[in-house]
Amino acid sequence: MSRPASIATRLTLLFALVSSVVLLALGGLVVSALERHFRQQDIDLLEGKILLIRALVGQAGSDAALPALAGPLHDAFVGHHDLTVRVARADGHLIFANAPLTVPEAAHQPIEWRSGGHHFRALSTTIASDTPARAPVEVTVAIDINHHTAFIDRFSATLGVFILAAALVSALLGGWAVRRGLAPLRLMKARAAAVTATRLDERLPVDAVPPELAELASELNRMLARLEDAFRRLSDFSSDLAHELRTPISNLITETQVALLHTRDAAAYRDTLASNAEEFERLGRMISDMLFLAKADHGLILPSREAIRLEDEVTDMFDFYDALAEAGHIALHARGGAQLHGDRLMLRRALSNLLSNALRHTPPGGRVDVRIEHAAAGVTLTVSNTGATIDPARLPHLFERFYRADTARSHSEHEGAGLGLAITRAIVAAHQGHIDVESAAGVTRFRLHFPAPAGG
């Protein structure tokens, strides 16, 4: 497959083509104007000669006096070598002719023809008699226009050479102008070439390019900003992932090495294997959560759609967490109800993440509330719990992967990997909704907003 021509080449050729077409059109107009000028000039000359003949014929009062017109007509046209005159009576009797003349057709309009290497233009007319004694007279006057034709041919050839030279000069000037005009693109290319994985903060010059390219540069800068943010989040995620995986893997290696140092009884080996199994389960959950989030990032989680009564799902979740709530002396309360179309298992997972998170951060004697509200705009599910107020500076980061509001908290058997809220946000987004959080006066509230179904 051939490589397409560059923009500079295309613009240069287009500029040369347009210039050539314009010059050709202008040349055609000039040549056409010259031809019309010469034609009108010839017609005016022919009409003047006919008027002269008409005046001479008018002096003859009878047919007998017509032959005497040969002398005055000869004197009138002597020296006009390019003019051919024929004067005859209507019956064909020749009165005067300064040269043989054969007209293809008699017409009272100007006609043109070629004969013997000459180009003629002629005009014929009939001079009516004003007395019964004289018959009408037929007059034909022709002019050799070879000199006009030769001039137009030479002028057209000269004009053609000029147009060709002008088109070449236009192409050269157009190429120079195109290169100057595309200089901002070369500047953008140089700046774009400076963007690397370690220099994603580079931006294209918006103010240094023409307005036609400023919008493109702005859009490319926004794309670079998105790439920089995505790369930063990917780097942070990789670092966090390595940090999270290092602890359980280190635990597994340490416990296994300790178990292999000395011979132990079966019970000790079972304890080691049980401890290792807990770490493996934790790794399995973490990997499963990361795979889920990876699919969510690429839009690969497509929830099924079924009618779900949210109050029933909350009741089932309360039954599941009832024992944990009783152990922590935490009260569970729910109110409201609404129906939602979505994926039941995914919504249960989101609700379970929020409830487990609320129970984990609610002190003994506290309270966890779930409120479901239905409005024309959609459905809102709020999970709130009493406890320590979260620093407002930390609220925007709660849905980030591996983020924990309590940085001093160590990993424990009840502590997650920091992916629960990120998974919850991905599930809500898959249902075209969004989630927000607020924490004030010892109460933290997570709100899940789901849009009303299309068509009401």
Image (cartoon, rainbow, N blue to C red):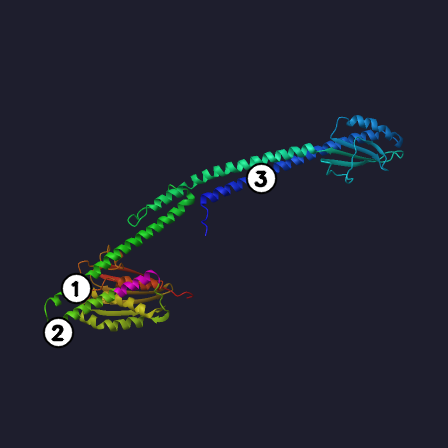
In the depicted structure, whether residue 4 falls above or below residue 48: below
Image marks 2 and 3: residues in contact by CB distance under 8 Å: no
- Closer to the N terminus: mark 2 or mark 3? 3
Using a 10 Å C-alpha cutoff, classify the residue at mark 1 as few (fewer than 14 neighbours), some (14 to 19) or many (20 or more): few
- Residue at which label 3 appears: 24
Q: Secondary structure at mark 3?
A: helix
Give the residue at x 28% y 73%. 316
Give the amino acid type for the residue marked by disc 2 in the picture.
Answer: Ala
**Residue sitting nearer the eye, 449 or 156:** 156
Residue 308 inside the magenta-drawn segment? no
Image-quadrant location for residue 99? top right
Give the residue at x 30% y 53%. 229
- Looking at this view, name the residue that lies furthest to the front: 116
- Residue at which label 2 appears: 266
Q: Is residue 127 left or right of residue 207?
A: right
In the depicted structure, whether residue 114 falls above or below residue 330: above
Q: Which mark is residue 253?
A: 1
Give the residue at x 25% y 73%. 319
Image coordinates for residue 420, horizontal then vertical, percent: 26, 64
**Residue sitting nearer the eye, 231 or 424:** 231
Using a 10 Å C-alpha cutoff, classify the residue at mark 2 as few (fewer than 14 neighbours), some (14 to 19) or many (20 or more): few
Using a 10 Å C-alpha cutoff, classify the residue at mark 3 as few (fewer than 14 neighbours), some (14 to 19) or many (20 or more): some
Q: CA distance from mark 3 to mark 1?
A: 87 Å
Image coordinates for residue 134, horizontal then vertical, percent: 88, 34
Q: Which residues are magenta?
A: 287-299
Q: Secondary structure at mark 2?
A: helix
Q: Is residue 292 left or right of residue 85?
A: left
Q: Is residue 347 visible?
A: yes
